[in-house]
Image (cartoon, rainbow, N blue to C red):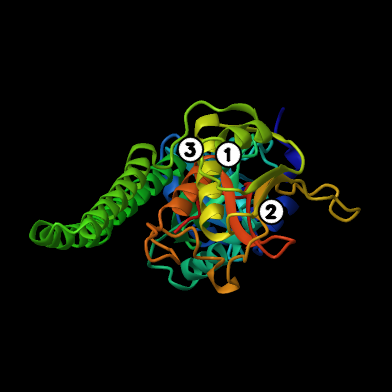
Amino acid sequence: MGRRRDSQGVVLLDDGEVVEANVAAQSLLDASLTNGTALSELASGLASLLDETPPTAKTVEMGGQLVLARLESLGDTRLLLLTEPTTERRDAILDALPAQCVVLDESGRISFADSAFEELIGREPGTLSDAQLVDHIHPEDTGSVEAAIATLVSEADNDHRFEFRVQNAEGEWRVLEADGRNLLDTPPLSGIVLVCRDVTERKQREHVLKEQNKRLEEFAEIVSHDLRSPLQVAAGHLEQAAATGSEDSFEKVRQAHDRIDTIIGDVLTLAKQGKSVQETQQVSIAEIAEEAWNTVDTKSMALEIEQDKELDADPDRLQQLFENLFRNAAEHAGEDATVTVGPVDPMHTSTRIKEKLPTGFYVADNGDGIPEEDHGSVFDSGFTTESDGTGLGLSIVAQIAEAHQWDPEATDSRDGGARFEFTEKVDGDTLKPE
């Protein structure tokens, strides 16, 4: 496709001064091109074209916009200055950068997005022009991005690094790290330039390391505190048993050793399996729950399956989750309690018909329930209301849930007992920028 000639400005120069200019040139250069106007007065950098042989083209800022200027010799001292709007040079510079690149104006409106950024978020070339950047990022990140842009505008001499999430063409949220620089007064870029890198995998590795360090701290606390206490109890009663032969003292030693064995078993579960899952498959929650029920001392409790549901899970880890919840019910809900397992399937309404709602399953009992102030703490490692509890059972449950990308929540059952819900993370749940 050829250039549109009606947008081309033409200026006739003689000995470096304007002789005549067409309407397009007057409009494009935003200047009154009267006879005698010097070429150097139109834009800085144009005068250097006079020294080049043969005259060449140059991109300069004129009249507040980027202009491609070209000189043509007409013989003797006369020259023809041809001008037209262009973004080619700026686009070439930005497209050459080894990352996604976006240029914003002072309000955060996109004036340029390179092909890498457009491809990442599944947009057609050129369709992001004049859009607000915050309209294309995760809603939770809009405030921090707007603040970062305001900082870049107000502190022109300082670069600024920040992170935000964008959704790619497959619907996955990716974390971008942006290095921002204020080049509003620097043609040809003339904007807030963000050079972005996809750091999602790095953030995931950092998250895994953070969780591993957290578990190591938990193990150290268990070894230094939870194991030391029953060891001291066992040592004290063993000394007394050796001196007196008391069967009661020997029994207390055995109880202390049982306590140590329980703690070690829970710690090994955390250490070996952590937050990982093996290969997942479609499983029945009713079948897995019944298998788990048969492996736990449930005393005289009863199991009811409200309704079966199939979900994608690691069957072994899911069975372990049920086992820990059933043990918890046996300890807290009472020997004659009823434990119910069923699906979580929110009902769509006319106003939420297109909204993706979380689905999953629950385990509930009709015991005394969990105090409301403890709902947010029951999954914390070490949290227990029993003097001889390890506080690891529900922590393991939470880790298994998170490994499956489920959100665990403790609440009240309809019978007043405890209810534990596990729902799939909906779109938008992802690693958050720090």
Task: Quadrant for residue 247, please give it.
Answer: bottom left
Q: Amino acid at mark 3?
A: Thr
Which residue is the extreme one toward the right?
A: 350
Q: Amino acid at mark 1?
A: Trp
The residue pinned by badge 1 equals 293
- Tell me where residue 232 appears, x and y as whole percent: 18, 61
Q: Is residue 58 above or below residue 28?
A: above
Residues at marks 3 and 1, CA–CA distance in whole angstroms: 84 Å
- Residue drawn at x 49%, y 43% is 400
In the figure, is residue 41 to the left or right of 249? right
Residues at marks 2 and 1, CA–CA distance in whole angstroms: 56 Å
Residue placed most toward the observer, 104 or 32: 104
Residue placed most toward the observer, 89 or 384: 384
Cβ atoms at labels 3 and 2 below 8 Å apart: no
Of the residues under marks 2 and 1, which one precedes in the sequence? 2
- Crowding near the residue tagged with mark 2, few <14, some 14–19, many ≥20 C-alpha atoms within 10 Å: some
Q: Which circle marks residue 131 in the picture?
A: 2
Of the residues under marks 3 and 2, which one precedes in the sequence? 3
Q: Is there any visible trace of residue 59 in the rendered image?
A: no
- Tell me where residue 71 appears, x and y as whole percent: 54, 41
The residue pinned by badge 3 equals 56
- Residue drawn at x 26%, y 59% is 221
